[in-house]
Image: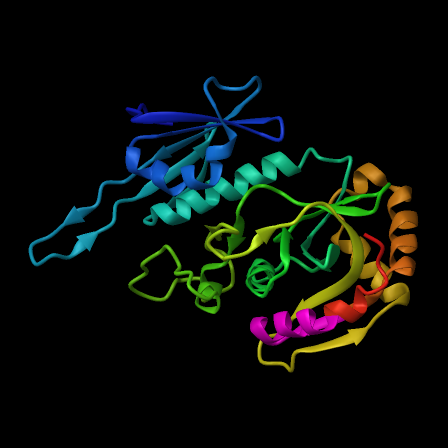
Amino acid sequence: MEQLSWAAEDNYLIDEVGVSVRATDETFFGLVRPYLASFAVDEPPEGYRRFSANVGEDRTWPGGKVTRGINSLYLGMLRVYRGRYREEMAGRLLSLARDMVTDGQNEFFRVRAGAVAVNGAAIILPSAPEPHLAGLVAILVQRGAGYLADSMAKIDPVLRRSHGTALPLMVDEVDFPLLQGVDAPVPRARPRRDGGRGVVPPLPVSVEQLGGAWADPAPIGWIVLVSFDPGEETRLEPAGGADALFRFTEAVLNLHVWQDRALLFTRDLLESVPVSTLVVGSLPDAADLLMRFAPSMLGEVSV
């Protein structure tokens, strides 16, 4: 990495994981500090990982046209982002920081799933890799569900509770118009080049911005296996058997740690709570459907 002049450096300790952030332009911190302020510490924690943001200089041309500078983000010596949008660079930083924090938490079953709490019980939403899962969770939070996880749920295999994270939701830019009162932070002048397929880094949105609430660890009350099929009829159907077991196991991210115990736990879990499938043709319709049926599906859960 080239020699640069750093305007400032912040240090954070997030669930015992040390993160340092430095940038060539002080203004970049305005995009990350609101989400990390509660984790700030004075000195770099032991074994910390460093993010370095080289912020490009914008140029204003005669007539008022602005050309955005090229921004680069490094994790150590590895470049992890290059592009014209500082907001995207902040999103990449926060996404990677969250991955660094959660990847070592193998005391939990880590499942590629969203998670919310309704009436004190958790709804787990396992999915294939999908950029719109966090958008569905964000809409559920705006509908009154408590926030636990946007795309990686942590399940305590002993108490069978879903635990949340204190980091923001990371929502795909194309889903921001579906969030009431929340604008996408990237003022994009033209359609993004990936066509909405989720290649562009997701953007942070806090629970407070959504007008929602954080949820305490909650017992699992309903598992909903989610598939996204835009344009299809949004529908909720019962599920179970080998197909449900396969789909849930496929979403477990640390099978290599739990090995044979993962299959036993998953099978027992799926037999002990209601299991459904959800085909998502429309994110708002899917959120409404889940919130409508949640009281009856979670009615027997002991909290």
Q: What stretch is highlighted in magenta?
A: 277-293
Reply above or below: 163 against 200: above
Q: What is the residue that sits farthest to the bottom in this orientation?
A: 233
Reply above or below: 301 against 1: below
The N terminus - image quarter:
top left
Please provide percent x and percent y for residue 8.
33, 26
Residue at 87%, 58% (x, y): give it.
270
Left or right of 32, for residue 300: right
The image quarter in which residue 133 lies:
bottom right
Left or right of 227, for residue 72: left
Residue at 32%, 49% (x, y): give it.
84
Model colouring: rainbow
Left or right of 145, for residue 27: left
Instruction: Inspect the magenta stretch and tell me whether residue 285 lies in it.
Output: yes
Please provide percent x and percent y for residue 28.
33, 38
Residue situated in front as seen by the camera: 20 or 115: 115
The image quarter in which residue 5 lies:
top left
Please provide percent x and percent y for residue 14.
57, 31
How many numbered discs? 0
Q: Main secondary structure of the magenta part?
A: helix
The image quarter in which residue 143 lies:
bottom right
Residue at 35%, 56% (x, y): give it.
186
Instruction: Inspect the magenta stretch and tell me whether residue 23 lies in it.
Output: no
Please provide percent x and percent y for residue 266.
87, 52
